[in-house]
Amino acid sequence: MKVRDIELTANEFTGSLSERDDRPSLPGDFAIWIFIFAEMLAFGVLFITFAFARAGDVEMYNASQQTLNQTAGLINTILLITSSYFVACAVAAISSGNARHCANWLTGAVMLGGCFVAVKIFEFSEKIDSGISLSTNSFYMFYLSLTFFHLMHVLMGMVILGFIIVKARRGGYSRKQHTGVETGASFWHMVDLLWIILFPLVYIMH
Amino acid sequence: MKTSYRKTHLTSFAVWVALIMLTLLTYRIGETSRAGSYAMPSLLVISLVKGQLIANYFMGLRSVSWGWRLVMPLYFLLVGGFIALAYLNSLI
């Protein structure tokens, strides 16, 4: 087969693909999706490692888990889910051309993120006061590192949303051009998705 | 445009309510059954459902091509499957 024939075949193939599926691509910048999938993969490996490490010493893991503040975990789950809802409303607002509403929803989401951070700091301080550290046992090593790693993502998400709020208030987004809002929103929802697994795995499942 | 905006808001609100209910159910399962081996599959299924709700309705993946849509459920099934395997392994 000649090069020209291969090119023609490739064009026919891509043409038939676009005919078959003309749905829009992923929301936001595609680069953020590479980052999202990489982060989810990294957390996924940690979740699975936690589960298999637990199988090695179930009693110790269950006893350590009992010392966690499940109510704080529940409050944080509600805070993250609600903030994700606010971010979804922000995307809906800018999609209809309402930049002011978009900025307001995002401000609400960042405030809820701040509440999440406050609850997490309270939880960490409780554990540090009890003399618990990374070296206490492998359960606390996983608990502290997983939740701290996740907390860093919450803080990063708050910074990203902060920049988007400023740009939205300055009229930097419109009904037709709001890729930045969708990109930031996708990152924030990923932070929520990770917590959806982390909460039952670390706080609830015995 | 306003109708579409309102409709999106209503859908997002309904999804938020469902997510809160599922979260409270997760917490309740943890409280009542001490989340033992019987609770583990239900907790993983709840996580899968919550993940799908967030991915499809909040992230907006329900309107993208099937290839991308499949990534999230596959992720939850894969990670959840390994977690289930590890928990079952600890029972043997």
Image: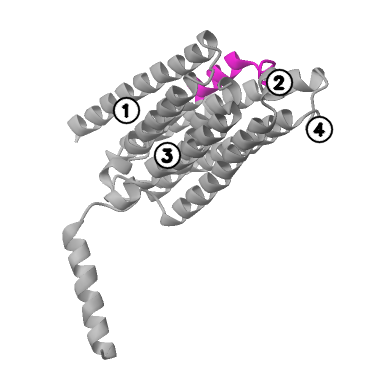
* Amino acid, disc 4: Ser
**Residue underneath mark 1:** B12
Question: Looking at the image, is mark 1 or mark 2 nearer the viewer?
Answer: 2
For the residues marked 2 and 3, what is the alpha-carbon distance in whole angstroms? 27 Å
Badge 2 element: helix
- Give the colour scheme shown: one colour
Which residue is identified by label 3? B77
Q: Is residue A172 above or below residue B27?
A: below
A66 is within the stretch colored magenta: yes
Q: Is residue B91 above or below residue A36?
A: above
Q: Crowding near pointer 2: few (<14 within 10 Å), some, many (20+)?
A: some
Asked whether the beta carbons under mark 1 and mark 2 sit within 8 Å of each other, the answer is: no
Circle 4 residues within 10 Å: few <14, some 14–19, many ≥20: few
* Front-most of residues A182 and A8: A8
Question: Please, which chain is the residue tagged with disc 4 on?
Answer: A
Region of the chain picked out in magenta, as a range = A65-79
Element at badge 4? loop
Q: Is residue B28 above or below residue A196?
A: above
Which residue is disc 4 drawn over?
Answer: A135
- Give the amino acid at mark 3: Leu
Host chain of mark 2: A
- Could you classify mark 1 by the number of other residues whose Cα lies within 10 Å: few (under 14), some (14-19), or many (20 or more)? many
Q: Amino acid at mark 2?
A: Ser
Q: Mark 3 or 4, which is nearer the eye?
A: 3
Residue A103 in view (yes/no): yes
* Dot 2 and dot 3 within a common chain: no
Residue A3: assigned label: none
